[in-house]
Amino acid sequence: MKYRRLGNSGLEVSEIGLGTNSFGKRANESTSIRIMEEALDNGINFIDTANIYAGTESERIIGQALAGKRQHVVLATKAGLVRGEGPNQRGSSRYHLQQELEGSLKRLNTDYIDLYQIHTFDPNTPLEETLRTLDDMVRAGKVRYIGASNYAAWELMKALGISELKGLNRFVSLQVSYSLADRTPEQEMVPLCLDQGVGIIPYFPLAGGILSGKYSLSDKIPEHSRADKDPSFNRFINERTLTLADQVSKLAAEHGHTPSSLSLAWLMSQSVVSTVIVGATRPEQLRENLRSLEIELNTGLVEALGNLSQRSRYSEPFATYRLS
């Protein structure tokens, strides 16, 4: 496993990170723990979760799986999306974030979070309130680094400016949908992050599995797939994404790769990317995705992938999660 710095921080994270959105949902507890063991055995040290994944089950399972191993991982979680119907059960106010941090610490069975991320921009809370709250968490030793997710470029830049002006800890990373099926971050976010030393952590690196080639233009949805377990995911499956997946699959076959590993290798070739979050519902799936680490992309292959995916650079973002 190779490791990269998370943005301009001194923190080293594995090129492949483990996404745990499926834990407690599409992967039961025992399978989730086996996936965690597989990840750690293969040198993955970046584990990403959130307070809302599987209704907090993801965090609880991770806390169990890391018993006695906590010091070996970079543990990342998030808060800010809707947790309930109450007026203070969403967003990035001091009230909500402090409450959610304590809940995450308890479920994860730890007394600190390595990377605490704001899950989405909160238009109803002043950024300075959010940033001061995060700064207090770092100073209290409960959080080591802070990151953002689903921010627009202007929102991220405003946050970085406030942190610099007020002498507060600044975001070291940004989670955003980024893949061959969604290159929209390259318009504004990638140049901004390169300039400001913020590491990008792509989510949906395989467009939710579409780039793996498991879906086709037929109406049949593969059993146990994300679209099968979560019907709302079907909104992402359309002619554009399926055509791209088919083209990537053919190109990968020509070079002796799987479409998944080739797609992940392309993302890791982007200098702004610190770690690529890869989810799994079984250990074998994780092992397959780790094959991407063995691929060395030549100029011709990079150019071919760029040409195939050019349309996704100027289309609508594949996914983004915002507070209404």
Image (tube, rainbow, N blue to C red):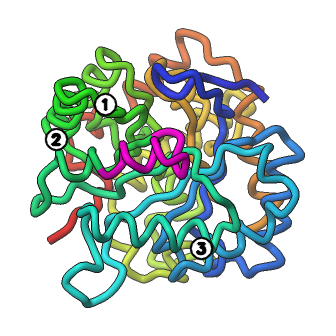
Q: Nearer the viewer, mark 3 or mark 1?
A: 3
Q: Which residue is mark 2?
A: 155
Which portion, as a residue range, is magenta?
133-145
Secondary structure state at the residue bearing disc 2: helix
Q: Quadrant of residue 10?
A: top right
Is tag 2's residue or tag 1's residue first in the polypeptide sequence?
Answer: 2
Q: Is residue 143 visible?
A: yes
Q: Residue at x 56, y 61 (%)?
A: 49
Q: Nearer the viewer, mark 2 or mark 1?
A: 2
Question: As drawn, is 64 to the left or to the right of 172?
Answer: right
Is tag 3's residue or tag 2's residue first in the polypeptide sequence?
Answer: 2
Q: Is residue 70 above or below residue 2?
A: below
Q: In the rendered structure, are the residues bearing label 2 and label 1 in contact, judged by CB atoms less than 8 Å apart?
A: no
Q: Quadrant of residue 168?
A: top left
Secondary structure state at the residue bearing disc 1: helix
Question: As drawn, is 14 to the left or to the right of 300?
Answer: right
Under mark 3, the amino acid is: Ser
Q: Residue furthest front?
A: 140
| Label 2, residues with CA under 10 Å away: few <14, some 14-19, many ≥20 | some
Under mark 2, the amino acid is: Glu
Question: As drawn, is 79 to the left or to the right of 212?
Answer: left
What is the x, y in percent for residue 1? 79, 29
Is tag 3's residue or tag 1's residue first in the polypeptide sequence?
Answer: 3
Under mark 1, the amino acid is: Gln
Q: Which residue is mark 3?
A: 225
Q: Quadrant of the C terminus?
A: bottom left
